[in-house]
Image: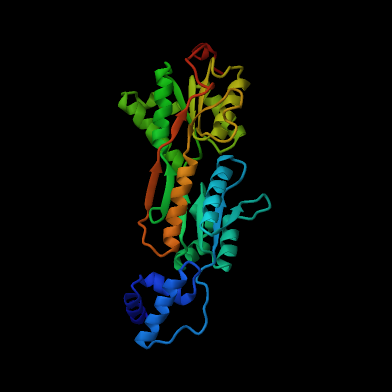
Amino acid sequence: MNKNLVDVARFAGVSEATARRALNGSALVAPATRERVLRALDVLGLPRPAAVQTERSPLVGVVVPDLQNPVFPAFAEAIASRLNKRGLIPVLCTRTSDGVSEANYIEMLLAQNIGGIVFIGSSYTDAGPEQGAALRRREVPLVLVNPADENADAVQVSADDADAVRQSLTHLTGMGHERIGLLVGPVGHVPSARKLAAFAAFWSARRAASERWMPLVGHALFSMEAGAAATETLLRNGATAIVCGSDELALGAVRGARRLGLAVPDEVSVTGFDDSLFMGVVDPPLTTCRQPVARMADAAVEALAQQIQGRPIEPGVTLFETQLIVRGSTGRPGGAAQRGRA
């Protein structure tokens, strides 16, 4: 049938992928295009399909690790609205406390002959080896947004983590801070690794010895409590400011500073990453790098739609610059350098 399909596609003036979709009755093919393909069958003396079946359903899985981090719902909402405008139906999938995982959702989505999947901030490997193999075997259209691990063979849309760190460090050093800490996610988390690499490169360019800045690097789970605990260590090591890998960690850093009796920003400055909802009204309002959620959602849905329509798209990462939003959590270094160390 492959040779026949090539002939049909050439006669109808469409791609092989479009011809295949037309013969399978896909809703993504315009009626006029389908009719051209069917007429090509007639002219070439090939039988028309006995029954029309939809190649893929219009359902699109939107997979997020959790809904506690405000940036995940923001991305999910932006992507869902853009899918709806294209006639696609978003299905929200998030890990639950009772043990429903990404792998469980992938099995359910595959059973529905899913049209595509957008992974937001999660680890593609969490889909599970069997489910991941099934996704590849069935060539399910995929887009990864800020993925947690390396995926060289996938289409990715990510914020520029390195540039965000450079913006925060430039802001803080410009205010006079010299002992700046970095608080990011767990070791192995790719966006955190990119932030750490940028942090190291920043100080290396200023000929600062690694022994000087390495004690000011902390890793923590993405939660306020974990951020608070890690911050206390960084402050005891002499940090007067902390660049955080998420707003959630930054709020934890503010909490950790206050536990040590230190005021933000008078004695400790804190920056975040995401510019999640309400970061402008917390106490103090958070200086943070804003992810361009709308533009990233546009790119993710466009890349997914191209795959669904059978258009070739090269795997790789499309990076989007963030914007440093300066608010009240950063200031010139105050009395932090004079505090006692525990």
Which residue corresponds to the image point at 47% horizontal and 83% vertical from the top-left?
Answer: 49
Which residue corresponds to the image point at 49% horizontal and 61% vertical from the top-left?
Answer: 132
Which residue corresponds to the image point at 35% horizontal and 82% vertical from the top-left?
Answer: 4
Which color scheme did the rendering employ for the protein?
Answer: rainbow
* Vertical order, 61 against 111 (above or below): above
| Residue placed furthest toward the front | 32
* Vertical order, 256 against 4 (above or below): above
- The one of 181 and 5 positioned closer to us in this rendering: 5
| Residue placed furthest toward the right | 98
| In this picture, residue 145 sits left or right of residue 3 | right
- The one of 11 and 64 positioned closer to us in this rendering: 11
* Vertical order, 96 against 260 (above or below): below
Visible residue check, residue 255: yes
Visible residue check, residue 146: no
Give residue 264's position: percent from left, percent from top.
Answer: 56, 19
Give residue 271's position: percent from left, percent from top.
Answer: 50, 27
- Number of callouts: 0
Give residue 54's position: percent from left, percent from top.
Answer: 52, 72
Say which quadrant the C terminus sits in: top right
Say which quadrant the N terminus sits in: bottom left
Give residue 229's position: percent from left, percent from top.
Answer: 59, 29
- The one of 74 and 230 positioned closer to us in this rendering: 74
Query: To which quarter of the image does residue 93 belong?
Result: bottom right
